[in-house]
Image (spheres, rainbow, N blue to C red):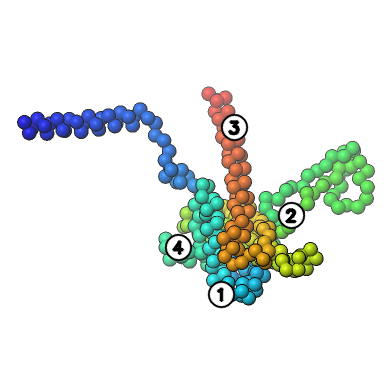
Amino acid sequence: MKNDLRLKHILSVIFICISIWHLNAQNPTKSSPIDSLAKKKNIAVVPFMPQMYQNDLSRLWYKTGEMTSHQTQLYEISRQIAHALADSLLNEYELTDLNESQTISTTDFLLEFYGLGSIAYADTFPQKTAKAKWLKNKSAFIKPHESGPDNGNIRLTEEERQDQFINFKIRDLKRYVKLCKELEVDQVLFINQFDVKGDFGSPYQSGRETNYFINIHYALYDDHANLLLGNKTKHTTTNEKARYRYFLENDLTKSTHEITKKISEMLKIQEEIQAELDAKLAKKKKKKQ
């Protein structure tokens, strides 16, 4: 009797296993959240150097006693930028914050990246290219800003350039590529300078409330040192509103979202270009078949 029950139990288990196998065979495998995470690109965030920090609001915080430590300001502001970036780009990227020590090797990656290049002013990127305007006659070409009338000739008209930003110019390309491979990152976001400037000379201030402009200069490079983005934020706050904690949690986050918006726009354009290329390749394959 016991043997019969044991045999029935074994047969039942075998039947259940076969049923599960059949169900899995009928249903195609679907991508899981883990699979989608694996496809994300990784960005390393290089924080601004201590000497590239200037904040006119510090005087107010020292006066009120909200924040008296310069070193704490540097660390907390830099860390909050990285956290805001990670939260905003969660669906598109993984972030490696070089504020935090890396345990994957003995290399001090932050100091290594700092030593790769130098700080210099540059035009915002991507930059609009100059356009040629065709006029009546096609017999001559006049350079931009050349004096004299058009006389019906072609004149090259340049788009007005935006304000420049402080860029990190990579000079040691081989070392940069090697560091990206060691960190296993696809892109590197340099926070080149952080400054908050008060509009003290404006005649439109209320006398008590003053505007302050938060400028985060940044540059995004791919893992082969090609510049993908380069610009600065333009968020405005006031001394009445920007108490230290509010500044960290609100103003700084809004400024950082200006960066993530540009990165998302860039990613969307890249995806559209890739989709067009894929469609062209698919057409070529059909023609060959």
Q: Is residue 98 above or below residue 264?
A: below
Query: What number is the disc on residue 162?
Result: 2
The amino acid type found where label 4 is placed reads Gln
Q: Earlier in the sequence, mark 2 or mark 4?
A: 4
The amino acid type found where label 1 is placed reads Ser
State the residue position of label 4. Answer: 102
Cα gap from disc 2 to disc 1, whole angstroms: 35 Å
Cα gap from disc 2 to disc 3, whole angstroms: 35 Å
Quick one: 158 or 237, which is closer to the camera? Answer: 237
Q: Earlier in the sequence, mark 2 or mark 1?
A: 1
Confirm or deny contact between disc 2 and disc 1 (CB under 8 A): no
Residue at horizontal 73 percent and vertical 57 percent from the top: 163
Residue 82, image x, y percentages = 54, 59
Cα gap from disc 4 to disc 3, whole angstroms: 42 Å
Q: Earlier in the sequence, mark 4 or mark 3?
A: 4
Cα gap from disc 1 to disc 4, whole angstroms: 25 Å
| Mark 3 crowd level (few <14, some 14–19, many ≥20, 10 Å Cα) | few
Residue 25, image x, y percentages = 34, 29
Q: Left or right: where does residue 200 sit relative to residue 216?
A: right
Please indicate, yes or no, whether residue 243 appears anywhere in the rendered image: yes
State the residue position of label 3. Answer: 280
The amino acid type found where label 3 is placed reads Lys
State the residue position of label 1. Answer: 69
